Image (cartoon, rainbow, N blue to C red):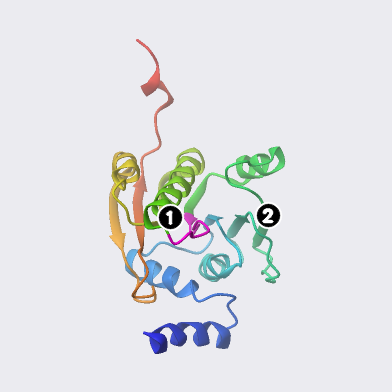
């Protein structure tokens, strides 16, 4: 499996991407036709920046990518990408204002992953927590008809994410890119055709 892993690592270096994860996004885009020129994209867990760069290529100069991550990055982005160092669980007022001013987004995507402990169930639970927060952000800032992409470490509580996603999107599909490491437990879920919740639905009669 080492040769398989090195192939994408070396390809990323040759093509000037900060991480091999960009090829996962490219596979998702090829399969689901996610991006078009001029789109607005929100990238959660953006560092070191490969997904933001990949999205920027597809949305072009008239598009916009807003990326955030709890970690900083030294990646140099094109003009259509704005990167903010932010904790998605504790967003600053300034970042919330930027989300409101920039959105709604055509695509909300999350490649967030927890710091792994080596304990399977702990890692899965933490991954689910990140996914649920990304989904909450998507529900608030995704445009009707938009797309949500989220990475999760598969575990027994997956329906906590999938149930609400299936109610919120016309179609939800699992996808394991070929560029994912074979030993990785990660899976990507792609929600297509976002159905914006009606504010009156929760009103008491």
Q: Residue at x 60, y 57 (%)?
A: 67
Depicted 80 relative to depicted 105: above or below: below
User: In the figure, is residue 200 to the left or right of 91?
Assistant: left
Q: Is residue 62 magenta?
A: no
Q: Residue furthest top?
A: 205
Tell me the residue that label 2 is attached to.
84
In the rendered structure, the answer to whether residue 85 lies left or right of residue 24 reads right
Q: Find numbered disc 2 in the image and state the secondary structure of the residue it sits on.
A: strand
**Looking at the image, which residue is at 71% across and 41% down?**
94
Magenta span: 109-118
Q: Nearer the viewer, residue 90 or 12?
A: 90
Nearer-the-camera pick, 136 or 117? 117
- Residue on which the image places disc 1: 123
Q: Nearer the viewer, mark 1 or mark 2?
A: 1
Query: Residue 124's spot in the image, x, y percent?
Result: 39, 53
Q: Position of residue 81 (x, y in %)?
A: 64, 62
Residue 116 in the magenta stretch? The answer is: yes
Q: Is residue 116 above or below residue 169?
A: below
Q: Residues within 10 Å of mark 1 (few under 14, many from 20)?
A: many
The picture places residue 135, in percent across and down from the top left corner, at 44, 44
Q: Are marks 1 and 2 in contact (CB under 8 Å)?
A: no
Give the overall secondary structure of the magenta segment. loop
Neighbour tally class for label 2: few under 14, some 14-19, many 20 plus, Cα within 10 Å: some
Q: Earlier in the sequence, mark 1 or mark 2?
A: 2
């Amino acid at each position: 499996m080492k040769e398989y892993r090195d192939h994408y690592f070396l390809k990323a270096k040759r093509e000037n991407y900060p991480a091999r994860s960009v090829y996962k996004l490219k596979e998702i885009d090829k399969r689901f036709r996610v991006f078009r020129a001029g789109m607005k994209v929100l990238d959660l867990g953006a560092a070191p920046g490969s997904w933001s760069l990949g999205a920027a290529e597809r949305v072009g100069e008239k598009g916009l990518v807003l990326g955030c991550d709890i970690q900083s990055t030294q990646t140099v982005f094109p003009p259509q990408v704005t990167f903010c160092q932010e904790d998605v669980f504790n967003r600053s007022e300034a970042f919330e204002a930027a989300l409101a001013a920039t959105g709604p987004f055509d695509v909300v995507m999350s490649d967030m992953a927890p710091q792994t402990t080596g304990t399977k169930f702990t890692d899965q639970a933490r991954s689910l927590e990140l996914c649920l927060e990304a989904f909450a952000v998507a529900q608030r800032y995704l445009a009707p008809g938009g797309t949500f992409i989220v990475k999760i470490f598969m575990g027994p509580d997956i329906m906590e994410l999938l149930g609400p996603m299936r109610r919120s999107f016309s179609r939800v599909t699992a996808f394991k890119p070929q560029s994912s490491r074979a030993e990785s437990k990660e899976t990507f879920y792609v929600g297509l055709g976002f159905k914006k919740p009606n504010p009156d639905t929760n009103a008491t009669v």
